[in-house]
Image: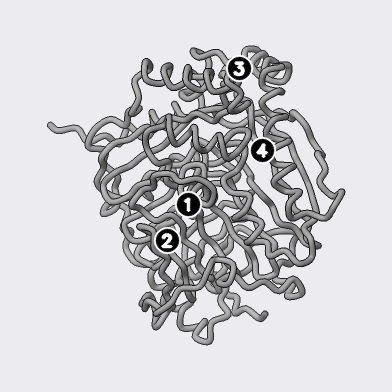
Amino acid sequence: MSYFKQKLNTQLTSAFDLLTQLYDLKGLVYLHDQNSPVIAFLPQKFLIFQRSTVQQFHQTEFNQYQIQAKATTVTEFSNFDPTSQTSPQDVAFNGGYIGFFSYDYSANQYVDISTHSQPGFFLGQYSTFLKFQDNAWYFYSDEKQAQSIYVLISDLVNQPSQKDQLTLSLLEECRPRWSKKQYLKAFQHVQEYIKAGDCYQINLTQEFRTAVKGSLLSSAQALWQLTHAPYAGYLKIDDFELLSCSPELFIEFRKNREIKTRPIKGTMPRFDDPQQDQMSKDKLSNSEKDQAENVMIVDLLRNDLSVYAETGSVTTTKLFEIESFSQVHHMVSEITATLKKEINPMQMLLSALPGGSITGAPKIRAMQIIEELEGAPRGAYCGSLGYFNFDGTGRWNILIRSIQKYQNELSMWAGGGITIASDAEAEYQECFDKISAMLDLLNTWQKVDL
């Protein structure tokens, strides 16, 4: 595949500034992708699932789309050629499919759960995008009219800034939907299910929500600078926006059909004082309770991967590693495997969603209990945002530490894995340890009537 490549004619260097200028382009998406940033837009075609209906659109002219009479399935939509070698590096976006799958859509493959009216998944085929390389942004496209698209994009990014028009304003403080009493009641129900033998672990989460005006994008730069998340991202589909500050990789699809997953399970807060911070890290490292949670999810994911992996290839390569992020320390393990030759990578991704680290074990019963206790659909939260190249390589995250906005409603979620050894007060506090800094920053944009 031959791409037209040209250094972007602009003084702008931050992804945030470019996204702001390109805000009105269809299918606008950004992936930090472990410090290999890409901004994509104007997919040649895309699938969108909303209100129980899948629709397919194709581009008719610049930023104009038409619905097709009949939509294909996700696996039919995504055609892979492992011999195409679109990825010059081990894994990096170089043309292919970008999108997200919500928790609601993913869980509904197995259990009947309530869903948001917002999009449940979006998947676009992108052959026009920007990549940050050698301290500059480069335009890539294999479209026939690539040069004219380059001129139009250069004009857009050099127009007067749209920042002031997009400013996010919270109409009220973003607060938890549950009171502490309600959380503790749900926690107790989980404990009863565990004692009854229904499950070993449940990922119990709670929603924080508010009403807003403006664009979620305007908060992106500040939130990304706060979190330094390796799997940060942004996606805009009409009146739906998704902002990821995720630290968690779900599945990485490598060359030669190799796959890798790195589940997070186990959290302790960070501290400014180095000695106190080290004590917190050591406490997590030595926590038998967190190790027990982590190994449950490792076993669950090993089972998920084994369905489509070559016999004997599933291997736990790292166990109970501690990774430190801006607000928290996390316990992370790693599992690798080799996909069977006949397996479509998209088929494998969809079957493994939602990720075991954000459901519990056993997985199907855990999702049923989550549906019963949480009282609201999660939407995109705990789903996955990512990409596939045309050769089947790619990366998909777990959408934790993520904010979603649909029309004028904004929400974010936080929670953790509950086991028989969990302490209710500690688990309640963990919700806030994970997102309090993001929440505090978000609330600085609250509208104040003078």
Question: Toward the viewer: 81 or 11?
Answer: 81
Marks 1/4: CA–CA distance:
20 Å
- Identify the residue shown where x is 45% and y is 46%: 112
Task: Find residue 420 and name its label.
Answer: 3
Q: Is residue 156 left or right of residue 305?
A: left
**Along the polypeptide, which appears first: circle 4 or circle 2?**
2
The quarter of the picture where residue 136 lies is bottom right
Quadrant assignment for the C terminus: top left
The picture places residue 130, in percent across and down from the top left corner, at 54, 66
- Identify the residue shown where x is 51% and y is 42%: 382
- Identify the residue shown where x is 43% and y is 77%: 70
- Describe the element under mark 3 as helix, strand or loop: loop
- Describe the element under mark 2 as helix, strand or loop: strand
Tell me the residue that label 1 is attached to. 105
Q: Residue furthest bottom?
A: 144
Of tags 2 and 3, the one toward the viewer is: 3
Tell me the residue that label 2 is attached to. 49
Q: Is residue 265 above or below residue 409?
A: above
Task: Find residue 255 and name its label.
Answer: none
Marks 4/2: CA–CA distance:
27 Å
Q: Amino acid at mark 4?
A: Pro
**Along the polypeptide, which appears first: circle 2 or circle 3?**
2
Tell me the residue that label 4 is attached to. 263
